[in-house]
Amino acid sequence: MKKILIITTLLSVLLVGCGKDNYDEPTSVIRGKVTYNGKAIGVRGTAEVIQLQLYQDGYQLKDHIPVYVGQDGSFSAKVFDGQYKLVARSNNGPWVNASQDTVIINLKGNTEVNYEVTPYFTIDNVAIALNADKNISANFTINKVVQSATVRYYSLIVNKTAFVDDAINIWRKEYTDPNLSVSLSEDLSSLNQINTNGPLFARVGVRSNLSEQPIYSEVVKIK
């Protein structure tokens, strides 16, 4: 009987297999977060853009299995017991290309494992709020981790759901001020959703000149 691997994430289910055979179902789960110094990294969580890759030596399918990373840095893979290699997809996330850095997982039952990376920047001391005058304020600190990196832009983003990034939002603004201690204030009174009873969420992002993807703060409910 041919076995398959089933990958489950917050956003998708991928089935890899073939033909009309009967299949065993995997029973073990690898879960964890992409981290820096043990702290989860915020990324774009939509469209399955940010990926890790899972390999199993000796398995008949030599290609990798994509493991999609959620906006809070979390990932999950449901697989069979065995030894796996977890690597980052090359030039994919807002961190130094580390596709050659391998985490070995000897899986027997469920296990938690974090994938440590080196981001170009981190974001700290984030405070985002919406006041009664419908002005949004955002204060945060950008920390340079990789000395050769520069800030291409940072952004303030708002959405009506808890999924917020550069690709999915109802309001977004980019800034190129080189100051790494940031204080922003914007008038959102013309935004239609401001005048409804629905919730609003926000986060900030920072994109390096060395990456195609920003690093993001946690999502904050502002309304």
Image (tube, helix red, strand yellow):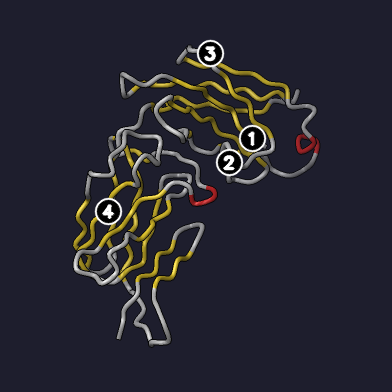
In the image, residue 63 above or below residue 199: below
Nearer the N terminus, badge 2 or badge 1?
A: 1
User: What is the C-alpha distance between the residues marked 1 and 3?
Assistant: 20 Å
- Judged left or right of residue 125, residue 32 is left
Type of residue at label 3?
Asp
State which mark lies toward you, 4 or 2.
4
Nearer the N terminus, badge 1 or badge 3?
A: 1
Nearer the N terminus, badge 4 or badge 3?
A: 4
Type of residue at label 2?
Val
> Which residue matches tag 3?
177
Please tell me the numbered disc located at residue 86: 4
> Which residue matches tag 1?
158
Label 2 residue SS: loop
- At 30% from the left and 33% from the top, the residue drawn is 118
Nearer the N terminus, badge 2 or badge 3?
A: 2
> Which residue matches tag 2?
164
Image x and y of residue 120, in percent? 36, 28
Residues under numbered marks 2 and 1 in contact, where contact means CB atoms less than 8 Å apart: yes
> Would you identify the image quadrant in which residue 196 lies?
top right
Nearer the N terminus, badge 1 or badge 4?
A: 4
Image x and y of residue 207, in percent? 47, 28
User: What is the C-alpha distance between the residues marked 4 and 3?
Assistant: 37 Å
- Judged left or right of residue 54, residue 163 is right
Residues under numbered marks 4 and 3 in contact, where contact means CB atoms less than 8 Å apart: no
Label 1 residue SS: strand
Nearer the N terminus, badge 4 or badge 2?
A: 4
Near mark 4 (Cα within 10 A), the count class, few <14, some 14-19 or many ≥20, is: many
State which mark lies toward you, 1 or 3.
3
- At 32% from the left and 33% from the top, the residue drawn is 96
